[in-house]
Amino acid sequence: MTCPISEQGKKINAPAGTEPSDALNPSGDVRRYRDSTTPPRFEIAGMRREKRLPQAVRPGKPSERFATAKDKERPEVSHIAEIRVRYHETDKMGIVHFINHFRWFEIGRTELMRSHKMSLPKLEKAGCFLILKETKCEYKSPAWYDDIIHIETKVVEVREKGVKFMYVITREEIKLAEGYTIHVCTDGAGKVKPFPEKYYKMFQEALG
């Protein structure tokens, strides 16, 4: 077996019973070894992390993180969108770059609105431009190329001039990320205004 050589000319020995499956990246910091019995591991700057960090969440059901006192008084309402991770969404280490989670939030939000017969063009035609006021994403576990992931989206708060969506992103039983976005209704000049009555009621219905 021939061991790979880094750019610095140092020989890199694979652990016993394994074969190096990939060449080093230009920095020489990432080494990947595989065998038939262990899952892929990354060794980065002396630290090892499992590819998948299990964290129980049942896909297809609203997450308990969405639960509020009001939720107990009404049926859960959420929408789940399914997508497959594309190659250009990954970074040099092979995991999904963090910026893509916000794009996935948009996919989940758009599909939820569509399921309630709403869309941004319809809102804009009614004189309401939905702009982002605040967002947050908490990362739990990495996603990888070709993973099938689920984006669970729910409307958790509706006010006269704004709406809040919450998101949980999962792969099988692993929670990858969760977060929220807050949007406000504005006119064509960017001034905050109340939702048109029709869409205010539709967002209220999306609450359940």
Image: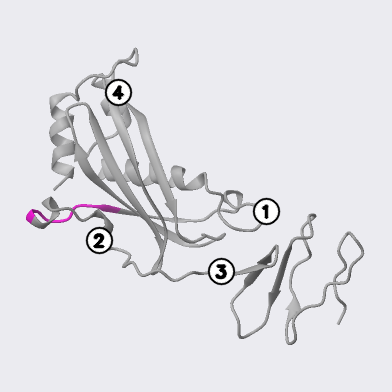
The picture quadrant where one finds residue 171 is bottom left
Which element type, helix, strand or loop, lies under badge 1? loop
Q: Which residue is mark 4?
A: 124
Q: Residues within 10 Å of mark 2 (few under 14, many from 20)?
A: few
Q: Marks 4 and 3: in contact by CB < 8 Å? A: no
**Of marks 4 and 2, which one's residue comes earlier in the chain?**
2
Q: Marks 2 and 4: in contact by CB < 8 Å? A: no
Q: CA distance from mark 4 to mark 2?
A: 33 Å
Q: Amino acid at mark 3?
A: Lys
Q: Amino acid at mark 1?
A: Lys
Which element type, helix, strand or loop, lies under badge 4? helix
Q: Is residue 74 magenta?
A: yes
Q: Residue at x 14, y 28 (%)?
A: 198
Q: Which residue is mark 3?
A: 51
Q: Residue at x 33, y 43 (%)?
A: 109
**Of marks 2 and 1, which one's residue comes earlier in the chain?**
2
Q: Which residues are magenta?
A: 73-79
Query: Which is nearer the eye, 116 or 7?
Result: 7
User: Which mark lies nearer to you, 1 or 4?
Assistant: 1
Q: Is residue 116 visible?
A: no
* Percent coordinates x, y for residue 19 in the rendering: 75, 79
Q: Amino acid at mark 2?
A: Glu
Q: Is residue 11 visible?
A: yes
Q: Which residue is mark 1?
A: 92
